[in-house]
Amino acid sequence: MNVLLLGSGGREHALAWKIAASPLLTRLYASPGNPGIGSVAELVKLDIADHSAVAAFCREKKVDLVVVGPEGPLVAGIADDLRAWGIRVFGPSKAAARLEGSKGFTKDLCAKFNIPTAAYGRFSDLASAKAYVEKTGAPIVIKADGLAAGKGVTIAMTLEEALAALEACFEGAFGVAGAEVVVEEYLTGEEASFFCLCDGATALPFGTAQDHKRVGDGDIGPNTGGMGAYSPAPVMTPEMTERTMREIIEPTMRGMANIGAPFAGILFAGLMITDQGPKLIEYNTRFGDPECQVLMMRLKDDLLVLLNAAVDGQLAHMSARWSDEAALTVVMAARGYPGTPEKGSVIRGLEQAGGEGVEIFHAGTAINGGALVANGGRVLNVTALGATVGEAQKKAYAALDHIDWPQGFFRHDIGWRAVEREKAGAYPHP
Ligand code: AMP
């Protein structure tokens, strides 16, 4: 098979690495890719927003499958266009990608199909949103409806913060994404990421993870796209997984089919495990980054076989096998992230850092004058497998020690919650 992978992050490097290991693969193309992806794929320059140009490339190179990494092209309808032109695509339609593209859409779906989630209101004007917030009180959560690169959510602990967030949204802080706002109940509990591989009718559980969103050790400081992750998520016990499938994922699959937008692709549920059980915080319609990196390390089966089954509506006959080992990834970021990262600094020592059960996935890297340099906020994902999260953590940090990049930084405590649980003897669960 010839495969075209779209995207350029650590998520796409992990996908490329796994796809490249498939005996089914003839050629792997990636666009725009990055130097890490370039070690396993042929990088091609395509304007991904120009769907007809992507289709023309697929015809020319006889591409049998397009795998879409990020949400942007999905929400823009790339899967619909390519399919209409007879090209097989892994990724949801524009209508199904509304699960990520519109928070209000997802909340209404939850309400209609009785899916547990935070109580909410949807607003398109400041006055009625303010009235709702004043009536409900703080803490409360304010969300721009559309895609805002992970920045559209404010957890307001006071009424003043909530009102300021509403004003910012309606004044255009998130552009059109904030023209509508979802205001929701503040949930407490432990968060987990739950993934399913879907073919429109069947959802196959596809791993669990937990990530660290805050930039600083001890989970403090500004939010980021994710500073590290590990898999599996200890809170996702077999019982919690079964409840999540029954109460959240399966009604979503039925609901989406019911409204004429069957979901095929990766359904990534952000969950809050509350005293009453799992509640949906949000859906994403693609793999998480850096969650994908730890999932790919643990997946024992051929990813390409599974992606094909999802595209062909054959998941009812499939299963996915996972390593019993834990995986953990530490993100190395460029100084300045999540604000304005410094670009161009030279990174050395990657060759010494690799090893058995260790993979270094590239995110924002580039080659400049023959040297590997930082070219974005999140730059490298140092990823390791271990018998426990603690072992994986030790291995990842030992590998990271070999990387010579003074302008980079990372968190020193990725996985701390799971490691504490392990020390207390409460994990892994059976
Ligand atoms: P989202 O972009 O919707 O995933 O929100 C980003 C982060 O905000 C989540 O990962 C949670 O940590 C937090 N969050 C979102 N919604 C809620 C909520 N209703 N209650 C508590 N925390 C929330």
Image (tube, rainbow, N blue to C red):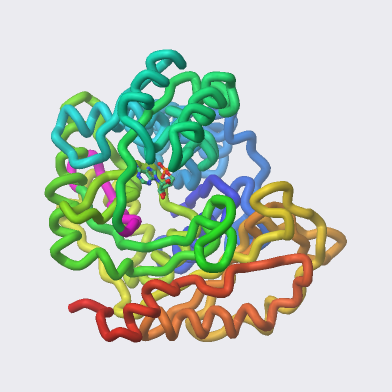
Picture coordinates of residue 284 (x, y %)? 38, 43
Nearest to the observer: residue 227 or residue 304: 227
Picture coordinates of residue 94 (x, y %)? 39, 28
Is residue 355 left or right of 134 when viewed as pictured? right
In the rendered image, residue 391 lying in the magenta stretch gets the answer: no
In the rendered image, residue 192 lying in the magenta stretch gets the answer: yes
Q: Residue at x 50, y 70 (%)?
A: 329
**Total numbered labels placed on residues in the image:** 0
Point out the stretch of residues depicted in magenta: 190-202
Q: Quadrant of ligand 1?
A: top left
Nearest to the observer: residue 180 or residue 256: 180
Choose top left, top right, bottom left or bottom right for residue 89. top left
Is residue 426 left or right of 81 when viewed as pictured? left
Choose top left, top right, bottom left or bottom right for residue 25. bottom left
Picture coordinates of residue 132 (x, y %)? 34, 22
Q: Residue at x 68, y 82 (%)?
A: 402
Q: Main secondary structure of the magenta part?
A: strand
Is residue 92 left or right of 178 when viewed as pictured? left
Q: Quadrant of the N terminus?
A: bottom left
Compared with 82, 311 (above or below) is below
The answer to whether residue 1 shows anywhere in this view is yes
Q: Quadrant of the C terminus?
A: bottom left
Compared with 162, 45 (above or below) is below
Nearest to the observer: residue 31 or residue 353: 353
Q: Residue at x 33, y 42 (%)?
A: 186
